[in-house]
Image (cartoon, rainbow, N blue to C red):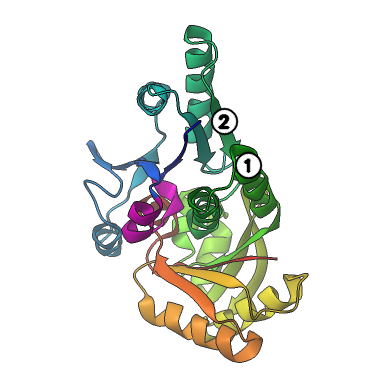
Amino acid sequence: MNLKILCDSACDLPEDIISELGIDVLPIMVINGEKSYRDRIDISPKEVYDNMREGVVYKTAQITPLIFQNKFEELTKDGSSVIYIGFSSGLSSTFQSANLAKLTIEEEKPGVDIEVIDTKSASGGYGFIVHEAAKALKNGKTKEEVIEIIHFNINNIDHIFTVDDIEYLRRGGRVSKTNAVLGGMLNIKPILEVLDGNLVVLEKVRGRNKVHKTMVELMEQRSVNKDFSDKTVFIFHGDDIEAAEKLKELIEEKLGVKNFLISEVGAVIGAHTGPGVLTLFYIK
């Protein structure tokens, strides 16, 4: 039986990888006032970040159950199985939409084979999980093997990230107004993780340079396997390639990592973290 992999645009994987691995991607909506844009189709991360620097406030909206239902029907009409690898249910209701669509189709068409899996991840962490699953499928793994790989990576992926301006997290309700004001005044940069699908503050440091060093130290401390030579590390950034390259160099020098993917944090996550977000993803 043919197997297809579906995800949504919060995975932030580059277009060349999506095309090479044959991944289907549904766009999440990015909203500015009364205007709505399909992520990766109608609006780019660069446009979002530039506008946010000028004071534009963006919101995002979940993919609806009807959109998922139509996509599931399209992908399964030839008898194929589908695995939807989903954006964290703790950060978006998109995963719930996928579940509702799955239940609807199963009632109407008994025997249809659709799996929906909550990665509890976002951006490059989510993208890493999708990437490894799609790569496994391309290499001939069975559906059961692909699902096993997905769950292994969900349980072992580490997300460490920082933001350049804590005010964007305050707008999304991730930090208090008082902490945002004090953080801005004192040049304090939070280092956060995604834990069980939710954002948790790990450290608070002063100044961007110390942030990079602390992120590398955390990676070393939190990794169970201390042999970093065969690890693949994803570094995603919010329109700040220089910061991403600097973080890469520090990881290379301190830990000996050889394999990196550097890419952008997309419009969906960027709308909530702001320009200058810097993220680090790897298997612990």
- Amino acid carrying label 2: it is Glu
* Disc assigned to residue 274: none
Compared with 232, 149 (above or below) is above
- Does label 2 or label 1 sit earlier along the sequence? 2
- Identity of the residue drawn at 55% across and 73% down: 189
Percent from the top left, x then y, of residue 168?
A: 44, 58
Percent from the top left, x then y, of residue 86?
A: 52, 40
Count of picture labels:
2
Residue on which the image places disc 2: 115
- Identity of the residue drawn at 41% across and 53% down: 21
Compared with 111, 133 (above or below) is below
Percent from the top left, x then y, of residue 133?
A: 54, 50
Is residue 260 rendered to the left or right of residue 199?
A: left
- Amino acid carrying label 1: it is Ile
Is residue 86 rendered to the left or right of residue 24?
A: right
* Disc assigned to residue 147: 1
Percent from the top left, x then y, of residue 260?
A: 50, 74
- Identity of the residue drawn at 37% across and 53% down: 18
As drawn, which residue projects farthest toward the top? 108
Classed neighbour count for the residue bearing mark 1: other residues with Cα under 10 Å, few (<14), some (14–19), many (≥20)? some
The span picked out in magenta is: 9-21
Compared with 229, 192 (above or below) is above
Q: Are marks 2 and 1 in contact (CB under 8 Å)?
A: yes
Please tell me whether mark 1 sits on a helix, a strand or a loop.
helix
As drawn, which residue projects farthest toward the right? 224
Quarter of the image holding residue 72? top left
